[in-house]
Image: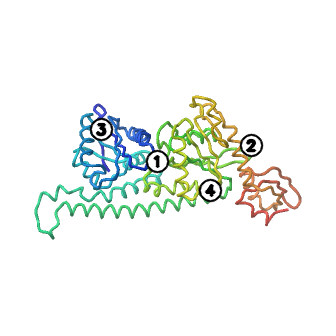
Amino acid sequence: MHEIEKDPLKPDYAYLVGVWENGMEDDPDTLLDELGELVETIGIPIGGREVVRIREVQPRFLVGSGKAEQIRDRARALGCQIIVFDVSLAPAQQRNWEQLCEMTVIDRQEVILDIFASRARTKEAVLQVELARAEYMLPRLRGAWGHLNRQRGGGVNQRGEGEAQSELDARMTRERIAKLKLELEAVRRHREVQRKRRERVPLPTAAIVGYTNAGKSSLLNALTGAKVHAEDALFATLDPTTRQMPLAGGGKLLLTDTVGFVRRLPHRLVEAFKATLEEAVVADFLIHVLDCSSPDMERHRDTTMEVLRELGAENKTIITVLNKADLLDSPMLIQRRDGAIYTSTLTGEGLEQLRNMLAELAEATLKASELLIPHDRYDIIAMLHETGCVKSSEITDNGVQVSCNLPDRLKGLESSFGV
C-alpha cells in the first residue's frame, strides 16, 4: 500500500479519473462524485477530475498513451500530486502510470482499503482488513524492487538483488496471508460461540443493511436507545453491533447494525467481510435502509441487493426503510414507493410505524402455546421471562401454567411441557 504522508500546511491534492466504457450502466460522473467523497474521507483534498471515454481497454495504461500523457499534464497543471482512478488498475498498469507521471497513482480499491484500515476497531475487522490489504499487495510486489536490478549486471541465470528482494517479500506476504486466515478462522469460531450463546436467549433477530451513509447506525440508536457511533461519513461503522429493542406487549427483538455497502466494492473485501455480513444471513428478517434524499437511491438499492444475493440472503423478508425523509424537498415525493416506510431519525417521522411493523414480524415468528412447567424447572420459566414471550403464568399444584408466544428456537418445549 502507498503510505501517503501529508503536511497539513501543504496538503497533497488528488486528481480523479473516471473511465467510461461502451455499455456501462452506471453514470461515470456520479461514480466520480462518490470517489471524491471516498478520497476526502482519507484526508486528501480534490484538485481536479475528468471522465475518460474509451472504446476498449488498453493493456499498458488502461487508456491510450496519448490520453495518459494528457491526464498527467492536467494533473501537474492543477498542482496535484496523486492520481486516483475510479476503476481497478492491474499491478503492471499501476507501475506504468507511476513511471509515466512520477507521482503516486492509486485506484478505488486502495482508497477503500485505506478507509477500512482506519475505521476497523474489533479484532475481527482489523484481521479482515489486513488480510484484504495483503492479498491486494501480493501481485504488486513484483517490480517493486526493480531499481536494484539496474544496479548490477549478470548472466541470464543470475538473479539480481531486486528479484531476490521481491521474491523474499512475496514469500513473507504469502506466509502472512496464511497466518491471517488461521487467526481469522479462530475469531470466526469465537463469534459462532457468541451467536450460539445469544440463541440460548432465543429472541427474534433482524439485521439492518444498506448502502454506506444511509443512516443505519442512527436508526439502530433511535429504535433501541443505544449510543452506537454514527456520523455523516462513508463507512462510519465497520463492526456489527447488536442491541435489544423492546416491543409492544413486552417482547424483545435483537437488532444488528452491519457494514454499509458501496458500488464497486472490491471483491476481496466482500469475501473478507462475509463473517461480519453473516449477521444478515442468520437474521429472521432484514431492514433495508435507503437514503431517500439521494438521487442515486435506486442504484444504491441494486448494489445492496446484489451483495445480499452473493450472501444467499436475498429471499428473506425485507422491510424497506426510506430514511432521511426530512431532507426531501417536497412532501409529495413521500408517495413515490408503495410498501416502504419513510423515516427520519432527526424528527422521529415514521419510527412508530416501523416499530409496529417490526413487532408484527417478530410476533409472526412466535407460536401461541400453553405450557405446564414442573416446579423443579424454574430455569425454563426464567428463560421464558427473559425472552419477554410470557403473556401470563399461574402457579398450580402440578407446576407453573404458562401462556406464552414461543419463538422458533423454543417450539420444542411443546413436546415436553405442552398442555
Residue linked to disc 2 = 248
Marks 3 and 2 close (CB-CB < 8 Å) = no
> Quadrant of residue 135 in the image?
bottom left
Type of amino acid at the residue the image marks with label 2: Ala
Q: Nearer the viewer, residue 59 or 250?
A: 59
Label 1, residues with CA under 10 Å away: few <14, some 14-19, many ≥20: few
Task: Check the picture and name the quadrant holding the C terminus.
Answer: bottom right
Q: What secondary structure is found at the residue carrying circle 1? A: loop
Q: Determine which residue is flagged by label 1.
A: 25
The residue carrying mark 3 is 6
Task: Looking at the image, tell me whether mark 4 or mark 1 is earlier in sequence order.
Answer: 1
Quadrant in which residue 351 is drawn? top right
Number of marks in the image? 4
- Tell me if label 4 and label 1 are in contact, CB under 8 Å: no
Q: CA distance from mark 4 to mark 1?
A: 25 Å
Tell me the CA gap for discs 2 and 1: 45 Å
Look at 46% across and 58% down and name the residue there.
271
| Mark 3 closeness class: few <14, some 14–19, many ≥20 residues within 10 Å | few
Q: Earlier in the sequence, mark 2 or mark 4?
A: 2
Does label 1 or label 3 sit earlier along the sequence?
3
